[in-house]
Amino acid sequence: MKRSSHPASVAPALPRLTKAQAPLTHGVEVVNELGEREQVQIPAERPLTIYVDKRELVTLMTLGAQPELLVLGYLRNQRLVESAFDIESIAVDWEVNAAAVRTRHGIARIEERTASKVVTTGCGQGSVFGGLMDEVDRIELPAAQLTQAQLYGIVNAIRLKESTYKSAGSVHGCALFRGEELLTFVEDVGRHNAIDTIAGWMSMQPGNMTGGDKVFYTTGRLTSEMVIKSAQMGVPIVVSRSGMTQMGHAVAQQLGLCAIGRATNRRFVCYSGADRLLLQPELAMARPVAPAPIG
């Protein structure tokens, strides 16, 4: 039998990422209420300019914890790439505060698609390229539910999490859960950076990382852009320590997304998608169990 001369099909490759690191906090001297001088830590905010195929795109202000995933998630959530497979590599160099992105086939009509920009209510950069609502009509969220017990487990896991916020303050945190299981936790100077980083993390695990059984948590308020980004990731349930805006609420209702806010201790309010929340009101009356001592 004559052997075929055609090469076997090659599976698409995920992008090559550097692992650039930078200090997350910076020590400064302050004067306290007693007139005493002391050293405290503050978040080390820094600019990161993104270049796509040698074309300057945008500068993000970021903590810089996982900059390559931030860039990947940003490009996905701005709808400039469809998946991680569209990108060949992302190289971050903190000496010049730049991220160089090399795509496999370029980005079609990039000038046109990035010409219109909507400024959002986000901290830091807080902007999204034109067509903000175009994505909404095409999103169909999977069926998913969360129990009240699982919600309390999520809130407690965040409470116990060691974080930059606890040591330095002034940052937002976002997390991805499967039930009560914490999958990844990201902090940044803006909540949009944090959710973009989580989107990048999910993009790097395409074979086993769908959003249908996930819950997205944020310390920041649920604006329309935060709701849309969660929906783009396929995550149908979002939980916030803060509240929700009118436009965020309208988009969540349109999508059938479960939006839970003011989630602290055993208190919360469900703004939309209450059919996805399996209520156990008797748990709200129970006294929380203190965590067992370590060691």
Image (cartoon, grey):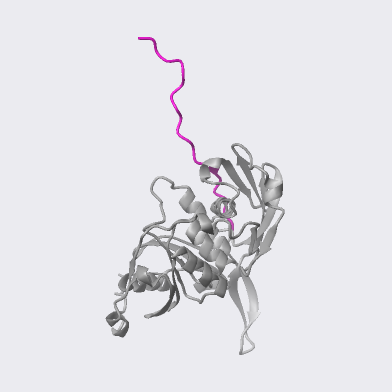
Residue 96 seen in the current view: no
Vertical position of residue 201 compared to residue 251: above or below: above
Residue at image point 62% right, 65% down: 44
Residue at image point 57% right, 61% down: 193
Vertical position of residue 123 compared to residue 136: above or below: below
The image position of residue 200, as x and y in percent, is 51, 52
Residue at the bottom extreme? 34
| 205 lies left or right of 111 | left
Q: Which residues are magenta?
A: 1-22
| 279 lies left or right of 81 | left
Depth check: give the residue in front, 7 or 253: 253
Residue 4 seen in the current view: yes
Depth check: give the residue in front, 170 or 124: 124
Residue at image point 63% right, 64% down: 126
Depth check: give the residue in front, 275 or 261: 275
Task: Give the main secondary structure of the magenta stretch.
Answer: loop
| 70 lies left or right of 7 | right
Image-quadrant location for residue 236: bottom left
Residue at the top extreme? 1
The image position of residue 92, as x and y in percent, is 61, 49
Q: Was residue 140 drawn as part of the magenta stretch in this picture?
A: no
Q: Was residue 19 drawn as part of the magenta stretch in this picture?
A: yes
Identify the image quadrant of the N terminus. Answer: top left
Vertical position of residue 287 compared to residue 135: above or below: below
Identify the image quadrant of the C terminus. Answer: bottom left
Count the labels in the image. 0
The image position of residue 67, as x and y in percent, is 57, 54
The image position of residue 35, as x and y in percent, is 64, 88
